[in-house]
Amino acid sequence: MELKNFFQIFLFVLAGFVVVSAQECGKTGFFIPGNKYDTNRGLILSSLASKVSAQGGFFNDSIGEGTDRVYALGMCIQGAEPDVCSKCIDSASNALLDKCPNQTEGLNWPEVRILCMIRYSNTSFFGSLKAEPPFHIANPADIRYDLTVFDQVLQGLATRMIASATSPSSKRKYYAVDIAPLTSFPSIFALMQCTPDLSLEDCHICLRENVADYESSFRGKQGGISYRSSCVFRWELRPFSEAFRDITLAPPPEEGNVTNTKTKKGSETVSIVIPTTIIVIFLVLLALGFFIYRRRKSCRALVYQGSSTDITFTPSLQFDFKTIEAATKNFSESNKIGQGGFGDVFKAVLNGREVAVKRLSKTSGQGAREFKNEAVLVAKLQHKNLVRLFGFCVEGEEKILVYEFVPNKSLDYFLFDPSIQGQLNWKMRYNIIVGIARGVLYLHQDSLLTIIHRDLKASNILLTANMNPKISDFGLATIFGTEQTRGSTNRIAGTYAYMSPEYAMHGQFSMKSDIYSFGVLVLEIISGKKNSGIYQMDETTTAGNLVTYAWRLWINGSPLELVDPAITRNYQSNEVTRCIHIALLCIQENPDDRPLLSDIILMLGSNTNTLPVPCLPGFLQRSRHELVHVSEGLESNEST
Ligand SMILES: *[C@@H]1O[C@H](CO)[C@@H](O)[C@H](O)[C@H]1NC(C)=O
Ligand SMILES: *[C@@H]1O[C@H](CO)[C@@H](O)[C@H](O)[C@H]1NC(C)=O
Ligand SMILES: *[C@@H]1O[C@H](CO)[C@@H](O)[C@H](O)[C@H]1NC(C)=O
Ligand SMILES: *[C@@H]1O[C@H](CO)[C@@H](O)[C@H](O)[C@H]1NC(C)=O
């Protein structure tokens, strides 16, 4: 214990870390040490460690009667291992007994890794939120990044996290951990948690207050922690908790202009010099550290690791070709789960995790370095409605992308098969529409990179076991090389059905061309029909596709005829009508008339706002012959 503290203080001095405490003793009530209250407090605090870990991370209780009654609660961060949890609570209790010898209230968030907290009082505080000044720890290092952009990303991240932490369907109560990428900087890593005794509203308030502290206390810093009695929020430019291991691979250090061999040599020499230097510095600083430790003993020092370079947690994104070859049984047919325009997809198990390996066809004209850079960028994009890129492999001619494995096939598999399309009820379809919208919103507007997908289609929407949608193949156009994508008629034509007129005719892509594809996708999800399908209409329109069909029904005032008969009548007609309306806005001929994804999300979320009247969809006024011609026969190219 003592030795560990020395070491922490040593680190502190070495790297300019700050030492602080997140303990508080009440300032109003006192008891006489050794009295009944004191005994009860000792009893309940010492029992917390085993109770909390046995109860899955949270426990509240009280002991004693009248003025001697002590209320206490302990919480471990969601997902903490029982023994780690128990240890944390145990040392937090001991520290608090030490720190608050005669105070009737006390609180301790002992670890800046945000592992656990305990609290006690002579009055019941369970389920109530205390108005109180927060406890702040700012990372002392300043940030060198455009602050207006940074603010936006952080606020966006925090807002999403609060929503997820306070979502009633969240698996881990009042807990969220997430990462938001920045373009030329490490990502922002953030974690938040409320104590589970709070109500949903109170948790929301508590987290919002903690997040709002950013503006006043942490702006311009590389990280910060905001504690209140019932909730905590921490963010950093590096992973500061085990929790991030579950959701991401840390981004690798920015690629400089240094070649690999040079870096290796450099680090070898450094590693020989450093040990001797360190020993000397260590001895000098040990004395200094001891001095500081003495001075701060009453605070039971905590170490705040403010540096943004965390060497212990940077698994590489790059995989070895041999490893992948072995994991896919040499790209065997039995492991193959799909093929697409960019290459074949194989299922594999890497490091004990199921993954989908996409082996890009060898014709990619892009250099290894550009490929890597793009892959690293795309790997930073993380959203629950996007298929995650775990890493890549580039060796000789081979370019491989390693993705998260999504178990439930793709949307087209369910949607267009009359024998199973009934499995997708309206609620699921609506959920899928909203999920896709969120994923595209993230790509377009929330991730800083502005990724245009360019190939949104039903076969690129994968479904999880819970039928939640995950968009795949985003960023592929850039990874693969722009020229390659555009130059190949095959690849473009394969998804003609979803292409906006301006993209199809002139190769102009933009967010608005993605939005057109989104509109077509929504129509397909509602109708259970492919856009490329031919429909018999009246004499003037001899043949039309889904887009023209939907438009005619809309004009005739019978949009609900579009709905897939497989859904039967189990849907809310206003919800469906609204989705059709939004889809028609998305597929308007003029790109400027199409709404942005942020508008679409608003439209989806409200049933009171009136929507604009849609104009003629694209393709209606044009000669479709060439388009129809190309779209035929190429649909068969696509599969998951
Ligand atoms: C708790 O302690 C405070 C301060 O000593 C006191 O005012 C209050 O009455 C106590 N509450 C109970 C329930 O004993
Ligand atoms: C509480 O303890 C502190 C130091 O241990 C002492 O200075 C203070 O007088 C005590 N307060 C009461 C009310 O006993
Ligand atoms: C724990 O807190 C809840 C309020 O959130 C309360 O209903 C419950 O009685 C408490 N448990 C104990 C053992 O006091
Ligand atoms: C790498 O160096 C070359 C010239 O040596 C330069 O043109 C290029 O911009 C540099 N790239 C980066 C990422 O610094």
Image: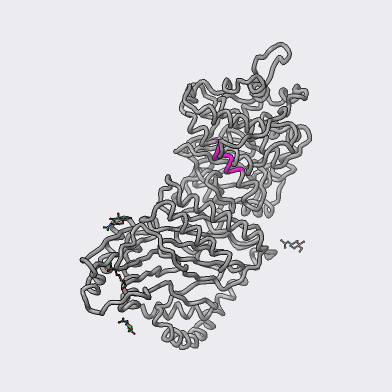
The quarter of the rendered structure image containing the N terminus is: bottom left
As drawn, is 99 to the left or to the right of 248? left
Q: For this rendering, which residue is in front, 34 or 451?
A: 34
Q: Would you say residue 472 is visible in this rendering?
A: no
Q: Residue 337, image x and y in percent?
A: 52, 36
Q: How many marks?
A: 0
**Up-down relation of residue 318 to residue 482 (above or below):** below
Q: Would you say residue 568 is visible in this rendering?
A: yes
Instruction: Tell me if residue 320 is in the magenta stretch.
Output: no
Span of residues in magenta: 433-440
Q: Residue 223, image x and y in percent?
A: 55, 66
**Up-down relation of residue 410 to residue 404 (above or below):** above
Q: For this rendering, which residue is in front, 323 or 106?
A: 106
Identified at 47% across, 69% down, the residue is 135
As drawn, is 324 to the left or to the right of 182? left
The quarter of the rendered structure image containing the C terminus is: top right
Give the image quadrant in which the ligand numbered 1 is located. Answer: bottom left
Instruction: Tell me if residue 436 is in the magenta stretch.
Output: yes
Q: Residue 232, image x and y in percent?
A: 45, 62
Q: Residue 362, image x and y in percent?
A: 66, 42
* Visual colour scheme: one colour
As drawn, is 578 to the left or to the right of 297? right
Identified at 56% across, 50% down, the residue is 382
Quarter location, residue 122: bottom left
Main SS, magenta residues: helix
